Amino acid sequence: GGFTVWRSFDEPGGIRDQLYQIARDNRNLVKLQVLGKTGQGREIIAVKVTQAANETPDGARPAVLYSSTQHAREWISTEVNRRLLNHYVNKFKANDKDVKRLLKDTELWFVVVANPDGYQYSFDTERLWRKNLRDNDNNGVITVGDGVDPNRNFDEHWDYDNEGSSSTTASDTYRGPSRASEPETKAMQGLLDRIKPKFQSNWHSAGQWILYPQGWQTGSPEADNPIYVALAGTDAKPAIPGFDPGISSDELYVTNGETTDYADVRNGTVSFTPELSEGCDGCGFVFPDDEALVEAEFQKTLPFSLSLANSATDPANPKSA
Ligand code: 0X9
Ligand code: ZN
């Protein structure tokens, strides 16, 4: 508690309450869905934003998925995504012509806290917690050795090698006991398979990149895919100012069982991992609790977010940021 910007999942007025509130206040526009429950019983929540949200079957319109907070400590990802949700709803209510048209033809999905147990733990106990809260040693208490990395547990090249993920339970990139073993993974995979989004932005931090698949190998097949290049931009003109676009395995490191690889390979989703800024030099995952800095980070990413939404009806001809 006591933060200006940051809100935990559980607290009154926290992220969970806010998601329910925005759905209650906008019944014709915002539909809330519980995708599953975590190990500690928290809800993994998705909201769909589209005109006639309740009457329109999920996936009936070209979909875009904005997901965040797979990694507990990456609070800026939560906040950028929450502001993006509010942005669309507020613009629609203000009768913005472009957003009204967009939400007639397109459905936008938000999973603001993909790892609610870990996120809550990062407020209550350990600010730098990354993983979920699987009790790896089954001793009834969560300690440093526990948790699975939600971004190494997906059923795509899971356990492909020991470079891109770890079999050691205490590792921050522990891949879990089996493919898609975690409720957080099942929830996200289930949603991806059901709505088959044209585009996904899976917000993470920190480092100022716009990463894209496939992360399990270097020299990935998407390197020359003009749709990825058009939307992420180039080194000279990145879609988010100051961010470095490129194949995740080449720009950063190899991963296996990663979310955007699953989305790309299984569902043909053009799926990005933007790594948001630190907020200050050396801040790392602890983005400052500063309204102006957080809002600036959101505004910086907005053209990229809008470009995904505005390209969904004709994904082969992307409208770059
Ligand atoms: O390691 C991750 O899951 C992501 N970075 S973070 O610092 N937020 O943990 C990056 C995932 C992107 N994919 C690859 N680098 N292959
Ligand atoms: Zn991350």
Image (spheres, rainbow, N blue to C red):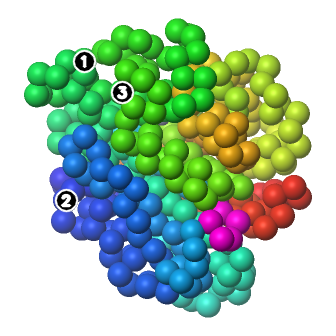
Apparent side of residue 139 relative to residue 266 in the rendered image (left or right):
left
What amino acid is at disc 1?
Gly
Magenta stretch encompasses residue 190: no
- SS class, disc 2: loop
Question: Where is residue 7 drawn, in percent x and y?
Answer: 29, 56
Q: Nearer the viewer, residue 262 or 318?
A: 262
- SS class, disc 1: loop
Question: Where is residue 56 drawn, in percent x and y?
Answer: 58, 79
Q: Is residue 76 visible?
A: no
The span from disc 3 to disc 1 (Cα, nearest Å) is: 10 Å
Residue designated by label 2: 11
Say above or below: 282 vs 113.
above
Q: Nearer the viewer, mark 3 or mark 2?
A: 3
Say above or below: 55 vs 32.
below
Residue designated by label 1: 145
Q: Which mark is residue 148?
A: 3
Image: magenta residue range: 59-64
Apparent side of residue 261 relative to residue 313 in the rendered image (left or right):
left
